[in-house]
């Protein structure tokens, strides 16, 4: 371990209707663990599928959602999550939506963080929350230990949802700005790779290759085409139960609601030029120009 590197340190706990960060204080890392982070609806499930297909060499029957728990979610008992992970003999990959300063950081592990332009996140999140069933809201709000406000179903007006998410910093979930800032601050760490939804859209095979190299996974080249194919949106949509949390049980219409469209700029004919200017100016104020430009575009430009 390089003693000259300033590693992230956990300096607070974060509790809300979805998350309890204290579980990381008890988690037993393995040095080859892979931690996948994001704000939410930014490409997390896509990244989990990519990592799973790399580890398991393009297995078409892989039940990704059963292997890679969201460790800090409240609704699954920590003993169950620990048991799932402890039983795994292959390399483990674990999901979090925590900001980096609420996460226990292990310098021996590898960390992936994916982001997406906030309007695209908003449209995806609105679809998710609007279509989630009563069982989902009951589970989120009535699991013991809730800290803070309950999660309420949004109205059908996606523009109203957008204004609240932007102006109330992360409504109805958690802060977008602090989530991005805390990970961006440590972007030069040797064991952290930041990437963008746009880049996955534009050059999926190239991004998968970069991720494999970063994770030091030796790819079976005879399985490469299958790995890439199983990470395409169309394949994931067709096999949504294998990749969707809880197999899609939180939606009355099933897992395909979760793997929805996989497209960007559905907001383009809804938000005005003034709306976009407000968002872009606020993002630059909150994150600085370099980070804001990454959030807007990734390296691939707008898609």
Image (tube, grey):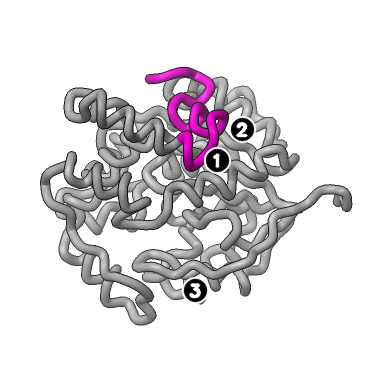
Q: Is residue 215 magenta?
A: no
Q: Which mark is residue 211?
A: 2
Kind of element beneath mark 1: helix
Identify the residue at horizontal 71%, vertical 43% (top origin): 191
Looking at the image, can residue 83 be seen? no
Question: From this viewpoint, which residue is outermost toward the bottom?
Answer: 144
Work out whether residue 260 or residue 224 is closer to the camera in this orientation and state it: 260
Q: Which mark is residue 256?
A: none
Q: How many angstroms separate mark 2 from mark 3 (CA)?
A: 29 Å
Disc on the earlier residue, 1 or 3 = 1
- Mark 1 touching mark 2, by CB under 8 A? yes
Q: Position of residue 279 (x, y in %)?
A: 35, 35
Q: Position of residue 114 (x, y in %)?
A: 51, 39
Q: Which residues are magenta?
A: 284-303
The image quadrant where one finds the C terminus is: top left
Looking at the image, can residue 106 be seen? yes
Kind of element beneath mark 2: helix
Q: Which mark is residue 51?
A: 1
Identify the residue at horizontal 21%, vertical 46% (top origin): 161
Image-based side of 296 in relation to 156, left or right: right
Mark whose residue sits in front, 1 or 2: 2
Residue 269, quarter of the rendered image: top left
Kind of element beneath mark 3: helix
Identify the residue at horizontal 24%, vertical 44% (top origin): 163
Q: Position of residue 254 (x, y in %)?
A: 21, 49
Q: Residues within 10 Å of mark 3 (few under 14, many from 20)?
A: some
The residue tagged 3 is 78
Identify the residue at horizontal 39%, vertical 31% (top origin): 280
Name the chief secondary structure element in magenta: helix
Q: Position of residue 3 (x, y in %)?
A: 88, 52
């Amino acid at each position: 371990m390089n003693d000259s590197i300033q590693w992230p340190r956990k300096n607070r706990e974060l509790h809300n209707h979805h998350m309890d960060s204290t579980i990381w204080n008890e988690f037993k890392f393995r040095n080859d663990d892979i931690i996948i982070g994001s704000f939410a609806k930014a490409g997390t499930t896509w990244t989990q599928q990519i990592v799973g297909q790399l580890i398991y060499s393009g297995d078409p029957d892989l039940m990704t959602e059963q292997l890679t728990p969201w460790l800090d979610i409240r609704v699954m008992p920590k003993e169950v999550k620990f048991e799932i992970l402890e039983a795994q003999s292959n390399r483990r990959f674990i999901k979090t939506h925590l900001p980096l300063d609420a996460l226990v950081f292990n310098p021996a592990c590898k960390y992936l963080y994916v982001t997406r332009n906030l309007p695209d996140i908003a449209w995806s999140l609105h679809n998710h929350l609007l279509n989630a069933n009563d069982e989902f809201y009951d589970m989120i709000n009535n699991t013991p230990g809730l800290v803070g406000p309950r999660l309420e179903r949004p109205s059908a007006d996606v523009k109203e949802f957008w204004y609240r998410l932007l102006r109330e910093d992360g409504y109805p979930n958690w802060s977008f700005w602090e989530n991005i800032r805390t990970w961006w601050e440590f972007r030069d760490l040797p064991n952290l790779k930041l990437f963008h939804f746009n880049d996955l859209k534009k050059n999926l095979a190239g991004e998968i290759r970069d991720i494999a190299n970063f994770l030091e996974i030796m790819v079976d080249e005879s399985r490469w085409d299958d790995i890439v194919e199983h990470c395409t949106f169309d394949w994931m949509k067709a096999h949504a139960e294998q990749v969707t949390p809880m197999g899609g049980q939180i939606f009355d219409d099933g897992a395909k609601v979760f793997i929805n469209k996989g497209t960007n700029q559905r907001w383009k004919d809804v938000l005005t030029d003034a709306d976009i200017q407000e968002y872009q100016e606020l993002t630059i104020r909150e994150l600085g120009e370099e980070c804001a430009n990454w959030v807007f575009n990734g390296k691939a430009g707008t898609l």
